């Protein structure tokens, strides 16, 4: 574990390449997605870059003095975000990551299909009490140092300052380490019609 001091700070446009790199290097169940996808850049095109484009004031990074080694990002209003994604973001990346011609057959096609149908990640039943959502990723050198909690607290405080009533997120069913982390922060399980089986949904009232 590195002893280099790390600060939590707001996102800058110059962080974009690091944001994308971190997303790829943590994009396979928390592990490096390179080698698992033909073009792993599809991952940040779904889970990172559109948030920086939509509302950079809700993106925070852990900076080791040289560059970002982790981030938290999200949207205060999930319904509005997925509208932006569909209408404004998708047209900028659709040609690079075309939708599969039929039923997705491998991980690459499943991710490209999700990119073109990102609304599937929106659960309208959460909009009233937990309208915000988030994604958080840390490279191995940033783990075990309290940075995940620091990033989360910074993000949650930003939501509270906006008067957002609650936030939700999805965790892979087998990701027990992440689930334990969110449990310690006070997140509890959410269930609702339209919440698919691919993730465990957790929520926190603010």
Image (spheres, helix red, strand yellow):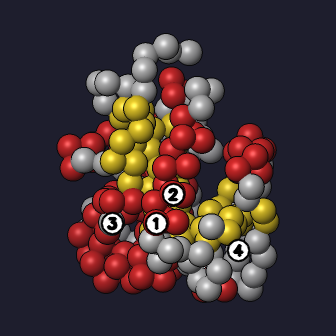
Q: Earlier in the sequence, mark 2 or mark 4?
A: 2
Do tag 2 and tag 1 residues touch (Cβ < 8 Å)?
Answer: yes
> Looking at the image, can residue 122 be seen?
yes
- In percent of the image, x 40 and y 48: which residue is there? 60
> Looking at the image, can residue 45 be seen?
no
Q: Where is residue 96 in the image (x, y as percent from the top left)?
A: 27, 62
- In percent of the image, x 23 and y 69: which residue is there? 92
Pointer 1: what residue?
Answer: 161
Classify 10 Å Cα crowding around label 2: few (below 14), some (14-19), many (20 and above).
few
Q: How far apart are labels 2 and 1 at the CA level?
A: 6 Å
Pointer 3: what residue?
Answer: 55
- Residue 59 location, quadrant: bottom left
Element type where label 1 sits in the image: helix
Q: Please give left or right for residue 111 compared with residue 177 in the image.
A: left
- In percent of the image, x 33 and y 66: which residue is there? 55
Q: From this view, report whether residue 127 is shown above or below residue 147.
A: below
Q: Please give left or right for residue 30 compared with residue 62 in the image.
A: right
Number of the front mark, 3 or 2: 2
| Numbered tag placed on residue 196 in the rendering | 4
Element type where label 3 sits in the image: loop
Q: Where is residue 38 in the image (x, y as percent from the top left)?
A: 42, 47
């Amino acid at each position: 574990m590195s002893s280099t001091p790390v600060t939590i700070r707001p996102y800058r446009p110059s962080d974009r390449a690091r944001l994308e790199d971190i997303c790829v290097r943590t994009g396979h169940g928390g592990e490096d997605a390179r080698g698992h996808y033909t073009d792993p850049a599809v991952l940040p095109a779904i889970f990172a870059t559109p948030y920086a484009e939509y509302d950079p004031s809700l993106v925070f990074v852990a900076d080791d003095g040289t560059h970002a080694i982790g981030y938290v990002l999200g949207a205060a209003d999930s319904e509005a975000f997925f509208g932006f994604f569909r209408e404004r973001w998708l047209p900028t990346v659709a040609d690079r990551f075309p939708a599969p011609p039929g039923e997705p057959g491998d991980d690459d096609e499943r991710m490209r299909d999700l990119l073109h149908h990102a609304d599937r990640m929106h659960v309208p039943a959460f909009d009233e009490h937990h309208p915000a959502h988030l994604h958080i990723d840390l490279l191995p050198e940033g783990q075990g140092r309290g940075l995940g909690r620091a990033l989360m607290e910074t993000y949650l405080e930003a939501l509270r300052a906006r008067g957002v009533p609650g936030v939700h997120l999805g965790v892979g069913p087998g990701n027990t380490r992440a689930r334990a982390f969110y449990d310690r922060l006070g997140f509890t399980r959410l269930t609702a019609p339209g919440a698919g089986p691919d993730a465990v949904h957790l929520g926190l009232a603010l």
